[in-house]
Amino acid sequence: KMLLRAVESWPHDPTSLCALAAFVRDERRDMDRAEQFFRKAVESAPHDADALCDLANFLCEERRDIDGADILLQAAVNSCPEDPDVLEAYAEFLQKQRRDKKA
């Protein structure tokens, strides 16, 4: 309930939206609703690296949409090219999913 209240109070806050999406994914196992919240977070803040990475992770793990995840992670890197967490997330993705030498 608190997460829902946070989203109602700040409907464009990507952190609250991603937290609600993770709750819906993990506790309710409602993947369609979780994806809606993750996407809303990215729409609300298209350059927020955390929101981009969260949606990318969801697409990769739950939807097996590797290409979509790759595009989002590239956008996260472009938004925060010096952020070690973002760079690490993309490198791990490349190692696991792409077996790419870029990693």
Image (tube, rainbow, N blue to C red):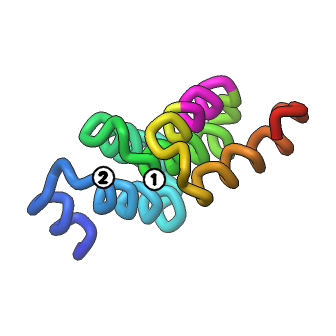
Q: Residue at label 1?
A: 50
Give the crowd class for mark 1: few <14, some 14-19, many >=20 residues within 10 Å. many
Residue 62 x, y percent position in the rendering = 64, 44
Name the dominant secondary structure of the magenta segment: helix
Residue 56 vs 88, above or below: the answer is: above
Instruction: Kindly give the residue lying farthest to the bottom in the view shown.
Output: 2
Q: Secondary structure at mark 1?
A: helix
The C terminus - image quarter: top right
**Distance Cα–Cα, label 1 vs label 2:** 8 Å
User: Does residue 5 appear in this view?
Assistant: yes
Q: Residue at x 18, y 48 (%)?
A: 12
What residue is drawn where x is 20% and y is 59%? 7
Labels 1 and 2 touching (C-beta < 8 A): yes
Q: Which mark is residue 80?
A: none
Label 2: how many Cα within 10 Å (few below 14, some 14–19, many 20+): many
Residue 65 lies, with reference to residue 86, above or below; the image says above
SS label for mark 2: helix
| Closer to us: 19 or 13 | 13
Q: Amino acid at mark 1?
A: Asp
Task: Please state if 62 lies on the left or on the right of 8 as rendered.
Answer: right
Q: Position of residue 50 (x, y in %)?
A: 45, 53
Q: Which residue carries the number 2 mark?
A: 14
Task: Specify start and end residues of the magenta stretch as a single range.
Answer: 67-74
**Residue at x 66%, y 24% (from the top left corner):** 67
Residue shown at the point (29%, 61%) measured from the top left: 16
Which x, y percent locates residue 99?
90, 35
Quadrant showing the N terminus: bottom left
Horizontal side, residue 49 vs residue 82: left or right: left
Q: Amino acid at mark 2?
A: Pro
Asked if one can make out residue 55 in the rendered structure from this viewpoint, the answer is no
In the image, is residue 11 part of the stretch drawn in magenta?
Answer: no
Please determine whether, in this image, residue 50 is positioned above or below residue 32: below
